Amino acid sequence: MLNWFLGFILLISMVSGFNYSYKLTGIERTFLSLSGGVIESGLINMEHTSNNVYFYKPKLEANVKTYLSEELSRYCDTYKISFYYFDAETLEPCLNSCTGVQIRLVINLSPFPNYDQTYNYTINKGN
């Protein structure tokens, strides 16, 4: 009888571990996929006479939140996201015409450790 109990506990542990790893890799893939069109959709050329391209905060944040809400619904119910804008050359915080953004995603995967990841995106001007 003890063997059956230990086997059952082992089975439950393996299924829980598989479920956690499935969620974790899905969340990571989803967050890494941001770098494509979602981030680029938040760019704006403020001055048409020069090549000054910046992140347009309202559009970028709305697009990222929409994307994450749709894609993360398979893996979690809630998440926290924060944005930190900075100047890509000086790495100092900025309020307007920002050329860099740091996006942080935190998801509670209890009883396992939280997913807490940050990615930086900067505008690189080609030569």
Image (tube, rainbow, N blue to C red):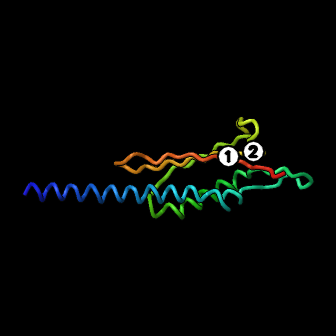
Look at the numbered disc 1 and give the secondary structure of its residue: strand
Rendered image quadrant of residue 74:
bottom left
Q: Position of residue 91 (x, y in %)?
A: 71, 37
Q: Position of residue 15 (x, y in %)?
A: 30, 60
Q: Residue at x 54, y 60 (%)?
A: 69
Q: Mark 2 = which residue?
A: 98
Give the side of residue 68 with respect to residue 38, left or right. left
Other residues around mark 1 within 10 Å, as few (<14) / some (14–19) / many (≥20):
many
Look at the numbered disc 2 and give the secondary structure of its residue: loop
User: For residue 101, which numbered disc appears in the image?
Assistant: 1
Q: Are marks 1 and 2 in contact (CB under 8 Å)?
A: yes
Q: Nearer the viewer, residue 110 or 126?
A: 126
Q: Residue at x 34, y 48 (%)?
A: 111
Which amino acid, by three-letter code, is at mark 1? Val
Rendered image quadrant of residue 118:
top right
Q: Residue at x 53, y 49 (%)?
A: 105
How many dots with numbers? 2
Q: Residue at x 38, y 55 (%)?
A: 20
For the N terminus, the quadrant is bottom left
Which amino acid, by three-letter code, is at mark 2? Cys
Residue at the limit of the structure toward the right, as seen here = 49
Q: Position of residue 26 (x, y in %)?
A: 47, 60
Give the side of residue 89 with respect to residue 61, left or right. right
User: For residue 25, which numbered disc appears in the image?
Assistant: none
Other residues around mark 2 within 10 Å, as few (<14) / some (14–19) / many (≥20):
many
